[in-house]
Amino acid sequence: TPLAGVIGWPISQSRSPRLHGHWLSRYDLPGHYIPMPVRPEDLLEVLQTLPKLGFVGLNVTIPHKEAVLQLADVVTDRASLIGAANTLIFRDDGKIHADNTDGYGFIANLVQNTPDWQPERGAAAVIGAGGAARAVVASLLERGVPELRITNRTRLRADQIKAEFGAKLVVYDWAQAGNMLEGATTVVNATSMGMVGKPPLRVPLDALSPGAVATDLVYTPLMTDFLTEAQARGCHIVDGLGMLLHQAAPGFERWFGRRPEVDAALRQAVL
Ligand code: ATR
C-alpha cells in the first residue's frame, strides 16, 4: 500500500489530507495520505526515514519548502527557479526528486475556469513578491505573457524577482500599484492580504480593465474584497481554491497512479 503525506510545522491547517483523501476514496485506490508535523531540525532525518517505511512521496509546506531543495537529489528547473518545492517523489533508486507544482496549479485553475483566457495577448500584473508570487511569475512567463508587471510592499523582493526572471518584468513602486493595473489582461493578488484575520488589499482598482481575468491566491474567504470589486468592474474572476486543488494533482498521479479530477465534488470536500 503506497503511503504519502504532507510535512510542515505546524500542519493542522493543511487541507491536503482532505484533498488526497477524497481522491483515494473516490477512485477506491489502495493508499494513505497522512499529515505529519515535522520540526525544521528533524527534516533531514524524516526524509531519510520515510522511504524506508513505504512512503512514495510527500507534499511540503511551510517552513520546509525552501530547505527541501538542499536535501533533494534531483531538483526540477522550475523548482530551482522558484527557489522552493512543494512535491517530493521518493524514487525506486533511493533518490529524492523535488518539484514545484504551484505554477502548474495556478495556470490549470485559470484555464479550467476561463476557457478563453489568452495570457500571451496582454500584460499581466502580479501584486506580491513572496514564495507564491515567484511560482505565479514563473508560470505566467512560461505561458508567454509579453510583459509582467510586479509590485510589492517591500520593493527589494520585487527587484530580486526581476533580477532573476528577466527583461519582461517591470517593477512598480507599491505606491503606484494602482497604475500597474491599467491595460493588464491578467491580474493576480499573490499577497496574503484579504485573508481572514489579515488586512484587506488596499490597492486601488479603478484602472482595472473590464474583461481582464482577475484571480486571488487567497481562498479564505473564497470571495475576497478584491474579487468582489474586480467582478463589479466587469472582470472575469477566479478564486484561489482551484489553485490549491490543481497543484495537488501531479503528486497524486505520481504516487497513486491515477490522474485525478478537479471538480465541484472535490471543492466541496476540501472547503
Ligand atoms: P507566500 O508563500 O504566501 O507568498 P510570503 O513569502 O510570506 O508568503 O509572502 C507574503 C506576501 O504578502 C508578500 O508579498 C508580502 O509583502 P512583503 O514582501 O512586503 O512582506 C505580502 N504581504 C503580507 N502582508 C502584507 C500587508 N499587510 N501589506 C502588504 N503586503 C503584505
Image (cartoon, rainbow, N blue to C red):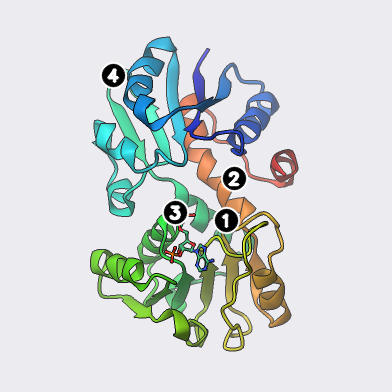
Which of marks 2 and 1 precedes in the sequence?
Answer: 1
Could you say which disc has been placed on residue 103 in the image? 3
Check disc 2 and give the amino acid type: Leu
User: Mark 1 and mark 3 in contact (Cβ < 8 Å)?
Assistant: no
Residue sitting at x 32%, y 19% = 48
- Residue 159: x %, y % from top left: 30, 71
Residue sitting at x 53%, y 73% = 187
User: Mark 2 and mark 1 in contact (Cβ < 8 Å)?
Assistant: yes
Q: Secondary structure at mark 2?
A: helix
Check disc 1 and give the amino acid type: Asn
Q: Which residue is mark 2?
A: 245
User: Considering the image in quadrants, where does the C terminus appear?
Assistant: top right
In the displayed structure, does residue 78 sit left or right of residue 185? left
Q: From mark 2 to mark 3, how far is it between C-alphas?
A: 12 Å
User: Mark 1 and mark 4 in contact (Cβ < 8 Å)?
Assistant: no
Crowd rating for badge 3 (residues with CA inside 10 Å; few <14, some 14–19, many 20+): many
- Of badges 4 and 1, the one in the foreground is 4
Q: From mark 1 to mark 2, how far is it between C-alphas?
A: 8 Å
Is the shortest distance between ligand 1 and the CB of mark 4 under 8 Å?
no
Q: From mark 2 to mark 4, how far is it between C-alphas?
A: 28 Å
Q: Secondary structure at mark 1?
A: helix
